[in-house]
């Protein structure tokens, strides 16, 4: 298939691009490199541009499918600067979607998030859980999910929304991995603290109603997320509308993540117990039965330890991420 991947130089995008190229697809990456990394994708595949220019890129290109990753994804920033999130995550995405409609792209796969559920009424979370985001980031993702369904109902293309839980890990060969600036995600922060690149990791809240008082998340290997996209593409066709949670279906607390990092690295992780971070639900764990049943998806990394081993390999070999002397 000829596929346009927006945000393909980002963390999840770059792992998906690699998988799709390996499966023989013809990939073009659209990325403005605001957060993406040039080194994460083959140079000859990369078009450096904003989503606002999607129309020029899609017109006449004959793409069979679009996979849409490009988005801002800092929950805290979305609260203080919602305009940035609505402009990019919603308006930019609508520009892309409309280009697909006008130029006959038949399949659209969208990166959504468990943040669209807000504080779930029951855990594990199924796709039927009410979507009530508690921050602008989640609102923009949900708004586009709805636009996508409306478009796919009225116009002849198929769509799939994948609601990711907590993406983690790195390519097992250690060549691509997670590198955010600023870094806010737990697993990279924990390894950076273990390596002495940060003084410590702060545990955001120890009084949650969970087994050890810290937040519980469903960490999913980035290559398993990539596989979900490949399977969705194979299933899509005109009139097909899919939506899936993608997680391993098992939750780990912040303290368990820290203990696992120590076991995997053999290093001590300095920690400090702090206050809750606003907007963090106590527990987010996927019920991913639907994607298992309908697409035959199975995580190759069904446990945290295996996921974190690949992350540790990346951090050891790339202590400065894609840049710097390392
Ligand atoms: N945490 C800490 N200390 C830190 C960083 C994180 O204790 O320094 C905790 C958080 O409170 C949370 C867990 O570690 O309980 C995981 O936090 P991350 O920041 O790694 O991930 P989030 O669960 O906040 O975010 C993920 C995605 C978002 C998505 C969100 C939905 O990265 O894009 O899930 O809740 F919006």
Image (cartoon, helix red, strand yellow):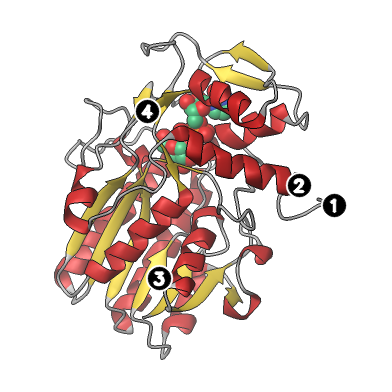
Q: Residue at x 75, y 29 (%)?
A: 198
Number of residue marks: 4
Q: Measuring 71% from the left and 28% from the top, which residue is drawn there?
A: 193
Q: In percent of the image, x 49 and y 11: which residue is there? A: 206
Q: Mark 4 highlights which residue?
A: 251
Can residue 75 be seen? no
Q: First in sequence: mark 4 or mark 2?
A: 4
- Considering the numbered disc 3 on the image, is that residue within a helix, a strand or a loop? helix
Q: Residues within 10 Å of mark 4 (few under 14, many from 20)?
A: many
Name the residue that disc number 2 marks. Answer: 320
Are dots 1 and 2 in contact, CB under 8 Å?
Answer: yes
Of mark 1 and mark 2, the one earlier in the sequence is 2
**Badge 4 or badge 3: first in the primary sequence:** 3
Give the numbered dot on residue 96.
3
Of badges 2 and 3, nearer the viewer stands 2
Relative vertical location of residue 146 with respect to residue 132 in this rendering, above or below: below
Choose the circle earlier in sequence order: 2 or 3: 3
Q: Is residue 288 above or below residue 276?
A: below
Real-space CA distance between mark 4 and mark 2, rounded to the nearest whole angstrom: 29 Å
Q: Which residue is labeled 1 in the image?
A: 325
Q: Is residue 64 left or right of residue 29?
A: left
């Amino acid at each position: 298939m000829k596929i346009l991947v927006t945000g393909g130089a980002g963390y999840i995008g770059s792992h998906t691009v690699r998988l799709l190229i390996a499966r023989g697809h013809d990939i073009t990456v659209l990325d403005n490199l605001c957060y993406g990394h040039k080194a994460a994708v083959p140079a000859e595949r990369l078009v450096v541009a904003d989503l606002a220019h999607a129309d020029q890129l899609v017109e006449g290109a004959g793409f069979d499918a679009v996979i849409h990753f490009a988005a801002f994804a800092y929950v805290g920033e979305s609260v203080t600067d919602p305009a940035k999130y609505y402009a990019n995550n919603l308006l930019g995405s609508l520009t892309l979607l409309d280009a697909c409609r006008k130029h006959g792209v038949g399949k659209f796969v969208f990166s959504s998030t468990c943040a669209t559920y807000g504080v779930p009424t029951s855990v594990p979370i199924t796709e039927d859980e009410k979507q009530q985001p508690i921050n602008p980031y989640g609102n923009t993702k949900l708004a586009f999910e709805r636009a996508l369904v409306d478009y796919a109902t009225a116009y002849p293309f198929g769509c799939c929304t994948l609601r990711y839980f907590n993406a983690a890990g790195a390519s097992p060969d250690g060549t691509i991995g997670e590198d955010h600036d600023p870094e806010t995600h737990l697993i990279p922060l924990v390894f950076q603290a273990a390596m002495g690149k940060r003084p410590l990791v702060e545990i955001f809240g120890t009084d949650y109603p969970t087994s050890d008082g810290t937040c519980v998340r469903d960490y999913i290997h980035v290559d398993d997320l990539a596989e979900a996209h490949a399977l969705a593409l194979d299933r899509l066709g005109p009139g097909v509308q899919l939506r899936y949670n993608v997680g391993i279906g098992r939750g780990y607390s912040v303290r368990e993540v820290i203990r696992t990092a120590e076991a995997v690295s053999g290093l001590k992780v300095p920690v400090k117990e702090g206050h809750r971070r606003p907007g963090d639900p106590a527990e987010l764990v996927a019920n991913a039965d639907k994607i298992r049943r309908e697409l035959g998806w199975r995580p190759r990394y069904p446990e945290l330890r295996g996921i974190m081993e690949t992350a540790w390999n990346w951090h050891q070999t790339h202590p400065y991420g894609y840049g710097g002397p390392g």
